[in-house]
Image (cartoon, grey):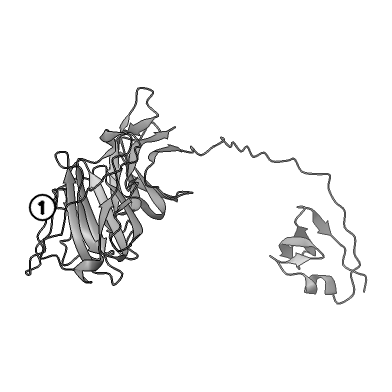
Amino acid sequence: MKNKVFYFGMFVCGLMALSSCGNDDLVGSSSLSPSFDSEAPASSEATLTVGTRGDDPASAPANGRIYVFSSTGKCVSLLSTDTSNPAASAKLPSGTYTICALGASDLSPYTLPDRVDATAASLITLKEGEQLNELFMATQSVTLEEGIDQTANIALTRTVACIDDITITQVPATVTAVSVEIGDLYTAVLLNGNFPAEGHTATVTAVLEQQADGTTWKASPDKLVFPSKGNPTLTMTLTTVEGTDSYSFELTSALQANKHSTFTGQYQVPLGAELQCTMTTTDWDEPQSLAYDIDANHAVFKNLTQGTFHNGYYVVSLDASARTAVLLAKEEIHYDKPAS
């Protein structure tokens, strides 16, 4: 898909025929009916020729539409071009007009407004089951002066983007399937080339295939899409024997019209280390000697309680009748009964 700037033109054709019931006016010759729905007296008319083929005849789209809107927003002329009639024109009252033009190799996949219903904000969508092609659009203002023929050159700009490749590397060997979803992408465009403020977005999904190295997964959809609404979100879904895991990332820039785009991701395998723990016990330290005084009322043993701490030492056992206490150090402390 080459990046071309398309020009299409219209030469002088006379007055535009508009039926009172509001059917489309598709003009490709100079034979126009005097029943043109003018907004000013015929004496103030001027000839408008929109666009030229430029230096390269191949730059004109094979199928084109040109909507001409008056300053009040009413579509006063609708013209078409094709390979047999690459130019068309019409006589219009003097004044300022807005031209909304679009072209492609084939416009039949799109829902296009007729002249009566058209506005600059008319929604252009794909018909059910159709696919986007290289759609080009442009909007331009032109002012006509009485009796002066004028040519308005319009450079059409590609309105769609292309997703070329999606690649993910370092995918774990346990993964059996990979898919990627990208959204939100617009599903419609306005006749003036802008995109809807609300709604009309969707996601596209690509199924990736495992490459020869076993860790790279790739898809080459070569798919035409409308641009993204803001920065798109990429959702990667990995399938293993244990189930599926999904990861979502907001990309750093929008998917832009008139650009080929590739998506490359690297699966970050968590880094791990094996941890081994070995426990050993120590031998007992040297015995510890404790000394204390015993009063006549055996207050020491009155203050000792088995299973509690005494002066920082755990009381393992207590035999008050034998005047013996076993502390945490497993030392038996014996004392003599005081002399009466």
- The answer to whether residue 290 is left or right of residue 150 is right
At x 32% / y 29%, what residue is drawn?
A: 210
Q: Give the vertical position of 298 relative to 245 (above or below).
A: below
Q: Which residue: 27% across, 69% down? A: 73
- Residue 10 lies, in percent from the top left, at 23, 48
Q: Residue 272 appears in which quarter of the rendering?
A: top right
- Evaluate whether residue 90 shows in this view: yes
Q: Which residue lies furthest to the bottom in this view?
A: 297
Q: Residue at the location (36% across, 34% down)?
A: 174
What is the x, y in percent for residue 121? 28, 64
Where 20 falls versus 218 (above or below)? below
**Badge 1 is on which residue?**
31
Q: What residue type is labelled 1?
A: Ser
Looking at the image, is 268 positioned above or below residue 340? above
State the residue at coordinates (80%, 70%): 301
Residue 207 vs residue 336, the one in the foreground? 207
Depth check: give the residue in front, 266 or 97.
97
